[in-house]
Structure formats: structure tokens, C-alpha cells
């Protein structure tokens, strides 16, 4: 089997897996964070857990980008791999270091899933950046796809980081419970961090126009959209004074 065939096979797998995840997530909410009700035998502090589960994406993307015989020295692919690695450095190192100390530990099963998924996702996107022919032309940087896509990414990242910062500051040292987040987009929706994440990857899918970036966007929606609805239901059930006008993930709509 060639690397190209492996890429195509895994890409189809991820599209199919995203569809399954979307359907399943309406019936089953992955038990981490507030939905973690039992203690697992093997658990890791959040800093270690996030590092272990997200960092494979950094290595997998580097491997396929630089070592798969693609265009790893061309300007546009290099810009995309830098953007990708910057996000994953943030998600696997900076985000966990800044997360609230009272956060729930991460179960080994969650880490195992994260390692497999992030290796696959890193492989696909690193390979796609290095092999997409349309990214060989530096003029791609002046197309509306790239410009609007990057603008969307900046908006998404800003929303995501601001929302996660609000959550991080809710707990005082030693606290582990949950409070009603306020300010920013929390005035309108329960999970702006998830909305920002989805906008960020929609931006990448548009800016790069690769099937791999699209597959990750679809997986992110499949994973986070039903979870956003579950968070919203949980907030309304948990807090009698939860703001009535607040929606789940789309301001004024849903
Ligand atoms: P959550 O919003 O569930 O939790 C984020 C952090 O904030 C946790 O430390 C959590 O603590 C704490 N927290 C959440 N709500 C409250 C509250 N009301 N009061 C006090 N503390 C609170 O986000 P996730 O853990 O699901 O995701 C973290 C980041 O990772 C997000 O930016 C998300 O977008 C991204 N992500 C991306 C995915 C993708 O598919 N691309 C998939 C999953 C996450 P505790 O752990 O105790 O609940």
C-alpha cells in the first residue's frame, strides 16, 4: 500500500467516523469534565492528560509533512504547517498549563482515544498540506479562500481563547465545582469555546481547501455540536437562575 492510498483510505474513514460520531453523540455524551461521574482505575492530572492526548498530532503532522515526499519547502504549505503546529502546541502545552487546577482528571480511555484520533488527524493534515497541488502556487495567498479563511480562523481562535479564559477564572484556588460563566459571548450562548473551535476549523478548511481540513471540521462539528447541547441542558438543570435568554451554541437561534 502506498502512502497516498493510506491517506485516501484514512480520509474516507474519518468522514464515515464523523457521521457516526454525530449520530452517537446525541445518545451518548463522552464522560469527561462535568459528565465524568465515575472514577476510572487509571487517571491522569489534566496537564499530563491533555499533553499526552493532543501532542501526537504535532508529531504525526511533522512526520507526514516533512517525510512523505511532498512539497515541504514550498511557501504556502509551510505557512499551513506552521499554523497547524502553533494550534497544537497551544492545545497540548499552553492550554493545559493554564487550565484551572480544579479540573477533572483525564481517564486512560480518553487519552487512548485522543492518541489514536490525533495521530490520524495529524497524519492526514500534514500529508494534505504537503501534497495539495493548488497550494504550490504562492498566489494562493491572495485568493478569497485564503484571506476569508484566515480571518475566520483569527475570529474563532479569539472567541475560543477568551471563552476558555473565562472558565479558567471561575474557580478560586482549591475549588472544583461549577459556576455560571458570564461576559463576552457567554451573554448569548453556553459554550462559546466550542463555537470558537468550530469557526477556527471552518476557517482552516476554507483557507486550505483540502479534504483533510474539511474532514477535521466535520469531525469537530460532529463531536462538539451535540456536546454543546448537552452542556446547555446541564446548565439549565443545574442552576435554577441560569439566564433564560441564553442559547446553546448559536446566538439567538439554538
Ligand atoms: P469545557 O468547557 O468542558 O471545560 C474547559 C475547562 O473549564 C475545564 O477545566 C473545566 O473543568 C472548566 N469549566 C468548564 N465549565 C466550567 C464552569 N461552569 N465552572 C467552572 N469551571 C468550568 O471544555 P472541554 O474540556 O470540552 O474542551 C477544552 C478545549 O478543547 C475547548 O477550547 C474546546 O473547544 C477544545 N476541544 C476541541 C475538540 C475538537 O474536536 N476540536 C474536542 C474537545 C475539546 P472540568 O474539567 O472540571 O469540567
Image: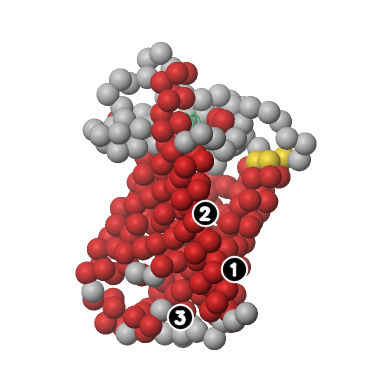
Instruction: Check disc 2 and report the residue beneath it.
Output: 17
Residue lying farthest to the right in this orientation: 41
Position of residue 60 measured from the top left corner of the image (x, y, whole percent): 59, 68
Q: Nearer the viewer, residue 26 or 49?
A: 26
The residue depicted at 45 percent of the width and 80 percent of the height is: 131
Q: Quadrant of the C terminus?
A: top left
Q: Is residue 73 among the parts visible in the rendering? A: yes
Of label 1 and label 2, which has the lower sequence position? 2
Q: Is residue 169 above or below residue 159?
A: above
Of label 1 and label 3, which has the lower sequence position? 1
Q: CA distance from mark 3 to mark 2?
A: 23 Å
Tell me: 221 left or right of 21.
Answer: left
Callout 3 secondary element: helix
Callout 1 secondary element: helix
Instruction: Check disc 3 and report the residue beneath it.
Output: 131
Instruction: Check disc 1 and report the residue beneath it.
Output: 60
Position of residue 73 measured from the top left corner of the image (x, y, whole percent): 46, 85
Q: CA distance from mark 1 to mark 3?
A: 15 Å
- Tell whether circle 3 marks a residue whose Cβ is less than 8 angstroms from ligand 1: no
The residue depicted at 34 percent of the width and 57 percent of the height is: 202
User: Are there few (<14), some (14-19), or many (20+) residues within 10 Å of tag 3?
Assistant: many
Of label 3 and label 2, which has the lower sequence position? 2
Tell me: 186 left or right of 9.
Answer: left
Quadrant assignment, res 5 = bottom right
Q: Is residue 61 among the parts visible in the rendering? A: no
Amino acid at each position: 500500500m502506498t502512502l497516498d492510498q493510506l491517506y485516501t483510505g484514512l480520509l474516507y474513514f474519518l468522514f464515515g467516523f464523523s457521521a457516526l460520531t454525530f449520530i452517537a453523540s446525541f445518545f451518548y455524551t463522552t464522560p469527561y469534565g462535568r459528565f465524568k461521574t465515575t472514577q476510572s482505575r487509571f487517571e491522569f492530572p489534566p496537564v499530563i492528560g491533555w499533553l499526552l492526548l493532543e501532542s501526537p498530532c504535532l508529531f504525526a503532522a511533522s512526520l507526514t509533512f516533512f517525510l512523505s515526499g511532498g512539497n515541504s519547502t514550498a511557501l504556502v504549505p509551510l505557512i499551513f504547517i506552521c499554523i497547524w503546529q502553533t494550534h497544537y502546541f497551544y492545545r497540548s502545552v499552553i492550554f493545559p498549563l493554564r487550565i484551572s487546577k480544579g479540573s477533572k482528571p483525564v481517564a486512560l480511555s480518553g487519552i487512548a482515544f485522543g492518541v489514536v484520533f490525533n495521530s490520524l488527524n495529524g497524519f492526514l493534515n500534514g500529508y494534505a498540506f504537503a501534497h495539495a497541488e493548488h497550494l504550490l502556487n504562492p498566489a494562493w495567498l491572495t485568493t478569497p479562500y485564503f484571506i476569508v479563511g484566515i480571518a475566520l480562523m483569527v475570529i474563532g481562535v479569539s472567541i475560543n481563547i477568551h471563552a476558555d479564559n473565562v472558565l479558567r477564572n471561575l474557580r478560586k484556588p482549591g475549588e472544583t465545582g461549577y459556576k455560571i460563566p458570564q461576559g463576552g459571548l457567554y451573554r448569548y450562548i453556553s459554550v462559546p469555546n466550542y463555537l470558537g473551535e468550530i469557526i477556527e476549523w471552518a476557517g482552516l478548511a476554507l483557507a486550505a481547501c483540502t479534504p483533510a481540513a474539511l474532514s477535521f471540521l466535520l469531525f469537530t462539528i460532529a463531536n462538539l455540536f451535540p456536546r454543546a447541547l448537552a452542556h446547555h441542558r446541564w446548565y439549565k438543570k443545574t442552576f435554577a437562575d441560569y439566564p433564560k435568554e441564553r442559547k446553546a451554541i448559536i446566538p439567538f437561534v439554538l
